[in-house]
C-alpha cells in the first residue's frame, strides 16, 4: 500500500513536471516568436520610414536646386532688357514685363531695381504672399504694389502705388523712410554677368524672411536688378512633403541652415502672440 501510494505520487509528479516543462517551453517559444516579430516589424517600419524621408529629402534638394537655377536664369534674363534705366531714371514701362513674369511664376514676390544715386523701385506681387496685403493695407482688388524711394538725406520719401491686375492705379500714399538700397547686401554684392544670392534676411516691406537674387545691369549704369523670393515659398512646398510622407499633415518638416537656424517649415505660423492664462488676483479695496 505504501509503495502503491508512493508510485502514485511519483506518477503525479512526473506528469506535473512534463506538463510544466511543456507549458514553459510553449511560453518561451511564444515570447521569442512575438519578440522576433516585433523586432522585425519595427525594423521594417523604421527602414520604410527612412526610405520615405530619404526620398523626400532628395525631392526637396532637387526642388531647391531647380528653383535656384530658375531664379538665377530669370534674374540674368531680366537684366538684359533694353532701356531698363534711361537717363539715370528707372523706365517704368518695364513694370509690364515684371508683372507678366510674376503672373506666370507666382513663386516670385517682387522685382527690384536700385540705382547708384540711392533711388529704389520695387514691384510686389501681392498674391505671392497673402500676409503682405494686411501689412501693406491693400484690398482684394489690388494685384500689385509699386513702391519707390527717392530723395536724399533726411528727405527720403517712399511712395506706394496700389495697382490692379492691369497695373491701373487705385490710390497712392507716401511716408518718410531711411531705406537705402546701396547698403543692402543684394546691392553691395551684385556683379556683372554673375547672379549673386543673399542669405535669408528680413524683407523691409513685409517684415518677413526671404532671399534676393541680384545682378548689375550690363549697361554700366551702376544699377542693380534684384529678384525676391520669400521663404514662405519653401514652406508651402514643405507642406506637400509632409503630406506625402504618410498621407496626412501631422508630420513636422523643417529645413535648417548649417548654423542650426530654421529656414522653412510646414508648420503654420501664428501672427498673434498667445498669452498664457493667469490666475485671478484678489486686490484689496481702495
Image (tube, rainbow, N blue to C red):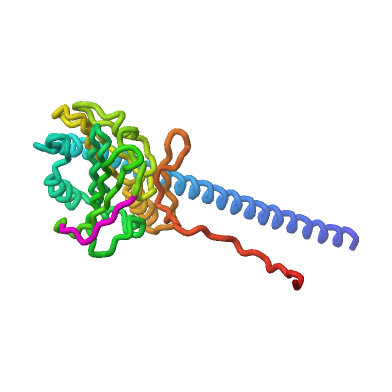
Q: Magenta segment: does it hold 212?
A: no
The residue lying at 63 percent from left, 51 percent from top is 28
Name the spot of residue 77 as percent of width and height, x first. 15, 36
Name the spot of residue 277 as percent of width and height, x first. 61, 64
Q: Quadrant of residue 172?
A: bottom left
Q: Is residue 90 above or below residue 248?
A: above
Depth check: 185 or 74 in front? 185
Q: Quadrant of residue 248?
A: bottom left
Q: Magenta segment: does it hold 170?
A: yes
Q: Which residues are magenta?
A: 168-175
Q: Quadrant of the N terminus?
A: bottom right
Residue farthest along the right direction in this orientation: 2
Q: Is residue 282 above or below residue 9?
A: below
Whether residue 85 is visible to the viewer of this picture, yes or no, is yes
Name the spot of residue 154 as percent of width and height, x first. 36, 40
Name the spot of residue 286 as percent of width and height, x first. 75, 71
> On the rendered structure, is 15 left or right of 257?
right
> On the rendered structure, is 27 left or right of 195?
right
Amino acid at each position: 500500500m505504501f509503495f502503491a501510494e508512493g508510485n502514485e505520487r511519483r506518477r503525479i509528479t512526473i506528469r506535473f513536471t512534463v506538463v510544466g516543462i511543456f507549458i514553459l517551453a510553449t511560453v518561451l517559444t511564444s515570447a521569442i516568436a512575438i519578440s522576433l516579430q516585433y523586432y522585425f516589424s519595427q525594423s521594417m517600419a523604421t527602414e520604410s520610414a527612412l526610405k520615405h524621408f530619404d526620398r523626400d529629402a532628395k525631392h526637396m534638394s532637387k526642388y531647391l536646386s531647380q528653383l535656384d537655377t530658375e531664379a538665377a536664369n530669370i534674374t540674368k534674363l531680366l537684366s538684359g532688357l533694353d532701356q531698363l534705366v534711361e537717363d539715370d531714371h528707372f523706365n517704368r514701362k518695364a513694370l509690364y514685363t515684371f508683372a507678366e513674369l510674376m503672373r506666370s511664376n507666382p513663386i516670385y514676390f517682387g522685382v527690384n531695381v536700385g540705382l547708384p544715386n540711392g533711388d529704389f523701385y520695387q514691384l510686389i506681387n501681392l498674391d505671392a504672399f497673402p500676409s503682405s496685403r494686411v501689412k501693406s493695407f491693400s484690398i482684394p482688388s489690388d494685384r500689385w504694389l509699386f513702391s519707390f524711394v527717392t530723395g536724399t538725406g533726411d528727405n527720403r520719401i517712399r511712395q506706394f502705388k496700389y495697382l490692379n491686375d492691369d497695373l491701373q492705379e487705385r490710390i497712392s500714399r507716401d511716408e518718410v523712410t531711411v531705406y537705402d538700397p546701396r547698403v543692402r547686401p543684394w546691392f553691395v554684392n551684385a556683379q556683372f554677368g554673375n547672379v549673386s544670392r543673399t542669405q535669408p534676411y528680413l524683407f523691409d516691406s513685409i517684415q518677413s524672411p526671404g532671399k534676393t537674387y541680384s545682378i548689375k545691369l550690363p549697361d554700366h549704369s551702376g544699377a542693380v536688378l534684384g529678384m525676391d523670393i520669400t521663404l514662405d515659398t519653401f514652406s508651402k512646398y514643405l507642406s506637400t512633403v509632409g503630406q506625402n510622407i504618410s498621407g496626412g499633415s501631422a508630420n513636422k518638416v523643417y529645413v535648417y541652415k548649417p548654423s542650426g537656424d530654421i529656414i522653412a517649415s510646414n508648420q503654420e505660423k501664428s501672427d498673434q502672440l498667445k498669452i498664457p492664462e493667469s490666475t485671478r488676483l484678489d486686490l484689496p479695496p481702495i
